[in-house]
Image: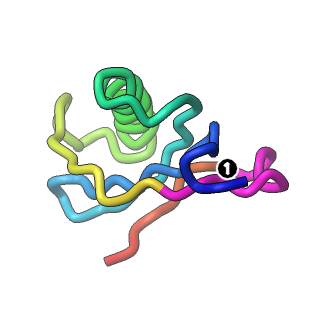
């Protein structure tokens, strides 16, 4: 399968506090859909982070660092990663 045919993507995020996370986006690389879907995934990831670190602000800026096609065998793996400073 070519990169453009991938349906599942690992999206690397870098938070304003320097932490890094990876979320799984499923769908085409169409800019409007990606922007909205990744934002929802990032908000959920931030809520998860706040459960572990309650002193984090309610909202935290992030940037999308990369999109990588997900491997078919990695579906059961946890998409979130910890600090990679």
User: Picture quarter containing residue 69?
Assistant: bottom right
Q: Secondary structure at mark 1?
A: loop
Q: Is residue 34 above or below residue 71?
A: above
Residue at 28% from the left image edge and 57% from the top image edge: 14
User: Picture quarter containing residue 36?
Assistant: top left
Q: How many marks?
A: 1
Q: Residues within 10 Å of mark 1 (few under 14, many from 20)?
A: few
Colour pattern? rainbow
Q: Is residue 77 magenta?
A: yes
- Chain part drawn in magenta: 68-78
Residue 76, percent from left and from top: 80, 46
**From this viewpoint, which residue is outermost toward the bottom?**
85
Q: Is residue 60 above or below residue 20?
A: above
Q: Is residue 5 left or right of residue 83?
A: right
Residue 15, percent from left and from top: 24, 53
Residue at 40% from the left image edge and 68% from the top image edge: 83
The residue closer to the viewer here, 36 or 47, is 36
The residue closer to the viewer here, 57 or 35, is 35
Residue 85, percent from left and from top: 31, 78
Q: What residue does disc 1 label? A: 78
Residue 60, percent from left and from top: 17, 39
Residue at 47% from the left image edge and 63% from the top image edge: 82
User: Picture quarter containing residue 58?
Assistant: top left
Residue at 67% from the left image edge and 50% from the top image edge: 78
């Amino acid at each position: 399968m070519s990169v453009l045919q991938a349906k599942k993507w690992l999206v690397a995020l870098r938070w304003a506090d320097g932490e890094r996370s990876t979320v799984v986006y499923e769908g085409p690389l169409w800019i409007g859909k990606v922007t909205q879907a990744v934002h929802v995934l990032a908000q959920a990831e931030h809520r998860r982070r706040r459960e572990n670190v309650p002193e984090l602000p309610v909202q935290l800026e992030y940037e999308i660092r990369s999109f990588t096609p997900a491997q078919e065998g990695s579906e059961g793996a946890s998409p979130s990663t910890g600090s990679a400073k």
